């Protein structure tokens, strides 16, 4: 009996802290959703906890705004993020398999090199990168936002750890005996085995690319090529006071809703994936 | 014929498979890096439509950066990071311990996990824009506080240094504490159950359990989290950039290093941008090295522990 009472108090404390934190996380999204459904005039009057009825009107306004082509931006972002996720996971798996399954002279050096640049920020080479793509004629295009994701050290490391834990080399050996070429072995035997790892990393690469702001802001100039984060930034830079505030809320909502939907559908895998590649146990 | 085939070397396939990665890294990271370092020694900028330079000026860019506000921006970055990181690691440790405590029955554990991780995935720029509209003088936060009677006058959150820095710190906290919690949870769950049982038999519970069992055992992951968080902090850009529209207002007290770099890049001041990048490169190189040492702990575990033992003995001797 004696030890039961403190545990009840503890349980109350734990739950109230958790509820406060969850409230903090959700409160802003709640306001966002409510405000996105109200009209500009309503918003000027003050805050209301209940949603309004202007959702579709606001959405329409955002869709038909020529100065901030939000839906074009979403399309661009989808292209960039989708392509990045695809080539990043494919080539990272390829690299990981190359270093895992074969023995060659430079193997150790190559591995050490990748590990050394594992967390190197891309910002430090941004200046040379900008000049390089200008020289290559890729300035103001979506390509320089996609191609560099072939070389993603962190994704490579994740794939490598995954291969270590789940691909026995005897399987590769068996495929060879059956006459499968090396490249075919990778595509038809190794890739299917790596599916879970690829799925997790594809989600993270997609989200990272979707949210990326620094490099796209330097590379993209023309309006019809802008990705969502750049549009949000130009929105901030625009003459804010003369704006329809309901439209601003709707734009922010449109920018983050795709990710929230993905997250709610896949939260189980995403949360499990956070830790997998992080640290070797 | 058949015998020859068996002794075939597959080494070349290894090279083929890793080629795209290295080719891509070489073109899009190493060449730019060399270019960046090279131009850091040149006077090379644009004034109006006229391009000045490039003329070789040695280390002048580095010196003039030291004389400029760079160190101040470095301090800003550090302050903004600390404001966000301290509550982040504190709350994350607390939650990680609670979530992994078997005796503690938490209702809706999965729900809480999903919710606290949510802000991490939200576009930082959109999140900052949302905060900007909500905390502006005629935004909903002011209007809620007014209607609740907490304040009489509207607060200009982004008008003061303290307000802006707190907002940036708060956003960083909100975006990252869930991620850190999940990392630390995995670390605690990695501790063998036997250890906890043995400790419990010896009467080690509550705070003692945290202090003497959990904390020492998750130290490697805690250190890893710290270093990666520092690297993330060094790159802080999206949130303060959008919140202050790139100005670092008020009076550039929330200007971070990357915002400084961004403004040089936007104005095409290549020499200065290069030198600043080299400074950042050196700092992140050191941090990368630390991470490298941590992630490769397993490969040379024995050598490491031996080295550690030696170091400990030496420390004792010095005392």
Image: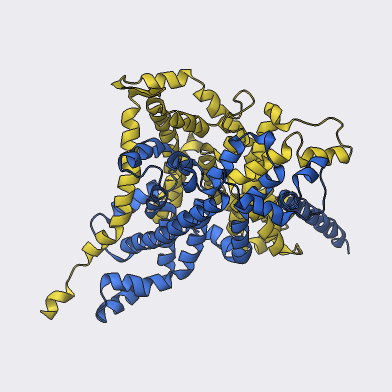
Chain colours: A blue, B yellow
Q: Residue at x 88, y 64 (%)?
A: A1
- Above or below, comparing residue B291 to residue A257 in the picture: above
Q: Residue at x 35, y 37 (%)?
A: A131
Q: Quadrant of residue A157?
A: bottom left
Front residue of this view, candidates A138 and B2: A138
What is the number of callouts on the image?
0
Q: Is residue B63 left or right of residue B220?
A: left
Location of residue B240 in the rendering, given as x and y in whole percent from the top left corner: 60, 36
Work out which residue is located at the far left of the displayed protein and give it.
B1
Please say whether residue B81 is visible from this viewpoint.
no
Location of residue B126 in the rendering, given as x and y in whole percent from the top left corner: 61, 46
Q: Quadrant of residue A74?
A: bottom right
- Above or below, comparing residue B90 to residue A196 in the picture: above
Q: Is residue A72 left or right of residue B301?
A: right
Front residue of this view, candidates A111 and A147: A147
Front residue of this view, candidates A49 and A15: A49
Work out which residue is located at the far bottom of the displayed protein and give it.
A178
Q: Residue at x 43, y 56 (%)?
A: A84
Location of residue B10 in the rendering, given as x and y in whole percent from the top left corner: 22, 67
Front residue of this view, candidates A156 and A202: A202
Location of residue A260 in the rendering, given as x and y in whole percent from the top left corner: 63, 58
Quadrant occupied by the N terminus of chain B:
bottom left
Please say whether residue B68 is visible from this viewpoint.
yes
């Amino acid at each position: 009996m004696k030890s039961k009472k403190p545990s009840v108090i503890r349980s109350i404390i734990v739950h109230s802290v958790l509820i406060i934190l969850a409230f903090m996380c959700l409160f802003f999204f709640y306001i966002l959703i409510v405000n996105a459904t109200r009209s500009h005039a309503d918003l000027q009057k003050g805050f209301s906890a209940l949603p309004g009825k202007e959702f579709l009107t606001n959405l329409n306004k955002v869709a038909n705004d020529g100065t901030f082509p939000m839906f074009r931006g979403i399309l661009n972002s989808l292209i960039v993020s989708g392509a990045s996720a695809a080539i990043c996971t494919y080539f990272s798996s390829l690299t990981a398999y190359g270093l895992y399954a074969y023995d060659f002279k430079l193997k150790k050096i190559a591995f050490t090199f990748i590990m050394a640049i594992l967390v190197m920020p891309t910002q430090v080479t941004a200046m040379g990168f900008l000049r390089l793509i200008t020289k290559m004629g890729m300035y103001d295009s979506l390509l320089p936002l996609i191609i560099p994701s072939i070389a993603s050290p962190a994704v490579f490391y994740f794939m490598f750890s995954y291969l270590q834990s789940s691909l026995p080399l005897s399987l590769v050996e068996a495929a060879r005996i059956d006459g499968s070429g090396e490249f075919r072995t990778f595509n038809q035997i190794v890739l299917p085995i790596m599916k879970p790892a690829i799925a997790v990393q594809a989600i993270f690469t997609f989200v990272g690319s979707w949210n990326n702001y620094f490099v796209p802001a330097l590379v993209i100039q023309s309006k019809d090529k802008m990705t969502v984060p750049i549009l949000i930034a130009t929105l901030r830079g625009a003459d804010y006071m003369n704006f329809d505030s309901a439209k601003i809320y709707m734009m922010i909502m449109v920018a983050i809703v795709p990710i929230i939907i993905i997250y709610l559908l896949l939260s189980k895998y995403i949360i499990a994936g956070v830790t997998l590649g992080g640290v070797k146990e | 014929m058949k015998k020859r085939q068996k002794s075939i070397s597959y080494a070349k396939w290894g090279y083929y498979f890793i080629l795209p990665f290295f080719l891509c890294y070489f073109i899009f990271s190493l060449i730019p890096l060399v270019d960046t370092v090279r131009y850091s020694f040149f006077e090379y900028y644009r004034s109006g439509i006229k391009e000045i330079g490039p003329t070789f000026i040695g280390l002048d860019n580095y010196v003039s950066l030291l004389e400029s506000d760079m160190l101040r921006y470095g301090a800003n970055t550090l302050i903004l990071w600390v404001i966000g990181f301290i509550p982040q690691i504190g709350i994350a440790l607390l939650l990680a311990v609670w979530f992994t405590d078997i005796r503690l029955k938490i209702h809706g554990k999965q729900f809480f996990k999903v919710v606290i991780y949510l802000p991490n995935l939200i576009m930082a720029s959109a999140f900052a824009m949302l905060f900007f509209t909500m905390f502006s003088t005629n935004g909903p936060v002011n209007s809620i506080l007014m209607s609740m009677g907490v304040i009489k006058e509207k607060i200009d959150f982004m008008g003061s240094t303290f307000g802006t820095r707190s907002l940036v710190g708060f956003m960083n906290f909100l975006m990252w504490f869930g991620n850190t919690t999940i990392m630390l949870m995995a670390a605690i769950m990695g501790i063998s159950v036997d250890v906890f049982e043995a400790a419990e038999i010896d009467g080690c519970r509550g705070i003692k359990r945290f202090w003497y069992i959990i904390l020492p055992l998750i130290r490697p992951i805690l250190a890893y989290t710290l270093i990666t968080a520092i690297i993330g902090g060094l790159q802080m850009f999206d949130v303060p950039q959008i919140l202050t529209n790139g100005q670092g207002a008020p009076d550039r007290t929330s200007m971070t290093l990357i915002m400084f770099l961004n403004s040089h890049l936007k104005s095409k001041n290549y020499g200065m941008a290069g030198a600043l990048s080299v400074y950042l490169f050196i700092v992140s190189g050191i941090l990368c090295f630390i991470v490298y040492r941590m992630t490769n702990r397993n490969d040379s575990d024995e050598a490491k522990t031996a080295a550690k033992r030696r170091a400990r003995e030496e420390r004792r001797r010095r005392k």
